Image (spheres, grey):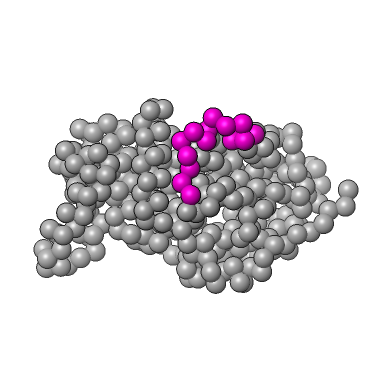
Amino acid sequence: MVHEINIGPDPEELRTRSILYIEDVYKAYGDNVILDDIDLSIAPGEFCAVVGPSGCGKSTLLRLILGQERTSSGRVLLNGCPIGHPDMDRGIVYQKYSLFPNLSAMDNILIGHKLRMWPWQWGSRKKDLTEKAMVFLGRAGMENHAHKYPHQLSGGQQQRVAVIQALFTRPKILLMDEPFSALDPGAREDMQMFLLELWEESRLTIFFVTHDLEEAAYLATRLVALSQHYSDERNPEELAKRGAKVVLDMRLRDVGAAAAPHIKSTAEFGALIQNIRRDAFEPGYRQHVKDFSLTHPHSFRTPSSFQGGQQNT
């Protein structure tokens, strides 16, 4: 079969107008290859969901963006600058409610501002920031729980506080790693709506990792699928040494249009889920690296991504 190479937009042009730019990223732990030449450009205000089979490196990619880990090769840029150690520019919400157990809900929300201010600054700003935090809590239906400690809150309530805590410092990008997977179905649906409402207002850039395809397709404006199930020019016996690539990158809806609650019940939505599952999750369905479904306008690939293996050192 003849494969026509489609590189996509010019990477350097994308880099200048992206909030997050990832190029030729390769990550391995010894001989265990996790990510194999990842190229990804995310514009300000996008809600990008990342899915893929277990072990494909979704959370590894998130940790590289957060700065908890370093790439084996390639570059990760935030607003054109190389990613450094974790800082306030990158908010994070984890699967398990990452709240300080000794602080109230209100104090958990305020702690980010308090820690980066001198005492005299905090004294002059505390009242104003507390009032703003109470507005957020009111939006979450938790104004009566502001002074409760995490152990006094349900799982859904704790995660609402965690989301507000991450948003309240106005990070450049919000990273979310399976944030709702520990919740029961009802609380999970409530949190999805809560997050969509906050995102519609703030237009914050969100990088959302989840194993739930329906959740990803419902929430996001853009869906990216990582997978190690593909073929390329390497020998079949090298299959186990291949890390995950971006096998699917698509626009789901316009940034200005919130997902409608009924969308999950439509035939089109069901067909979309099946296509994503086939392209990224089924080990027996192996697209060639030059046939990936990369239809998003900002999707691009550098020449090394067609070859496989580490290209940079």
Number of numbered tags placed on the structure image: 0
Q: Is residue 281 visible?
A: no
The residue at 32%/34% (across/down) is 156
The residue at 81%/47% (across/down) is 235
**In which quadrant of the rendered view does residue 282 lie?**
top right
Residue at the right extreme of this rendering: 1
Magenta stretch in the rendered image = 257-271
Is residue 167 rendered to the left or right of residue 269?
left
Is residue 244 rendered to the left or right of residue 152?
right
Quadrant housing the C terminus? bottom right
The residue at 48%/42% (across/down) is 259
Is residue 194 rendered to the left or right of residue 130?
right
Q: Main secondary structure of the magenta part?
A: helix
Q: Is residue 11 above or below residue 188?
A: below
Q: Where is residue 240? Give x, y as percent.
A: 70, 42
Instruction: State yes or no: residue 63 in magenta.
Output: no
Q: Is residue 184 visible?
A: yes
Give whichever of 201, 160 is nearer the camera.
Answer: 201
**In which quadrant of the rendered view does residue 304 lie?**
bottom right
Q: Where is residue 16? Give x, y as percent.
A: 55, 72
Q: Where is residue 111? Give x, y as percent.
A: 22, 54
Q: Where is residue 82? Give x, y as percent.
A: 49, 68
The residue at 22%/44% (across/down) is 138
Q: Is residue 11 above or below residue 54?
A: below
